[in-house]
Amino acid sequence: MDAEIRTDLALEEKERYEGTDVEVKGVSLEETMSPAGLFPVTMVKILNKEGERNMHKPAGNYITLENCRIDAYDEVLYEDMSEEIARQLLFVIGELEKKKKIRKKKVIVAGLGNRDATPDALGPVVTDHIEVGKYICAVAPGVMAQTGCETSRYVRGIAKELDAGFIIAVDSLAARNTGRLNTTIQITDTGINPGSGVGNHRQAMNEETMGVPVIAIGVPTVVDAATIVNDVMDNLMAAFENAGMIRGLSDTMEEFSEKEKKQLVKELMDQKARDLYVTPKDIDEDIRILGEIIAQGINEAMDRYHAVA
């Protein structure tokens, strides 16, 4: 049985090494703040093959906007988020241009996911707000269960037909930490594996499969049910220890590695519970707000990018 709790976030893979201050070979980490100083921004760079092995992800840049609490209306925060998304998109595009990987200005914004399943609807909601034009095309190709066609083949065909220079793919992700649901945005230049976070493996969308660079923007909207049970167990043991109760059991649990604890949790859960993914109750409103913020960031980035074309 697979004991690993699934995550699409590079930052969470880094955190498997007991904190951000631990050096992981082949990986660098840099922390800054957003333009208005409202939330932290973390850049994880996977530098080589050793980094790929340690992080279980392809080499490249992984930028994470964290603690973006959108549950209380805050126009200043929303503007700060969209500005940071625009800044980081332009940074990633600039890095790709330095490597001569982007040769044309035409961009396709692909909103991945199932519009009819709210936690998976982020991509299509984003494309609804993209300002399309001469250099920008927006598509929401649906999922294979709806179309009978691999999403990657659909997008690749459009990219080839329109002679696109690069693709921006937007999708919902899975997280290991419940606190990151709908509060974290990841931007990466390595592409995306649609559905991988929930074990639904589809063909990857990256430079190799698409023929052009793929920049992925994602937000974790679901978490593995085993993660919640594991977190509750940790909190319970901490409460018992603080109260001086059943110290022996608490000490025993502390001897378990994270992987061993998650293995135990999954063994205690029945098969149906193991396959559950959980999403916040306000997911409808969160997807609406996040979709508008991300679309605004993309629109701002593309306005600046094509202004100097």
Image: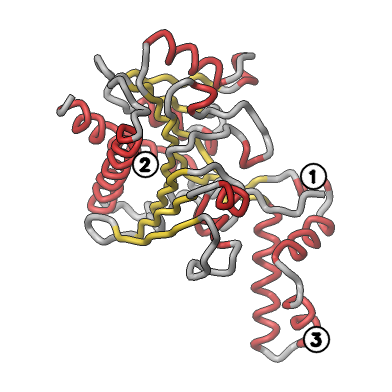
Q: Nearer the viewer, residue 104 or 80?
A: 104
Give the amino acid type for the residue marked by disc 2 in the picture. Answer: Ile
Q: Nearer the viewer, residue 144 or 78?
A: 144
Q: Residue at (34%, 18%) from the top-left corner? A: 137
Q: Residue at (75%, 81%) from the top-left corner? A: 250
Label 2, secondary structure: give it. Answer: helix
Alpha-carbon span between mark 3 and mark 2: 47 Å
Q: Is residue 93 above or below residue 137?
A: below
In front: label 3 or label 2 = 3
Q: Residue at (83%, 59%) from the top-left corner? A: 268
Quadrant placement of the C terminus: top left
Q: Which residue is under mark 3?
A: 248
Image location of residue 57, percent across then percent down:
57, 45
Label 1, secondary structure: give it. Answer: helix
Q: Residue at (70%, 61%) from the top-left corner? A: 229
Question: Is residue 285 among the parts visible in the rendering?
Answer: no
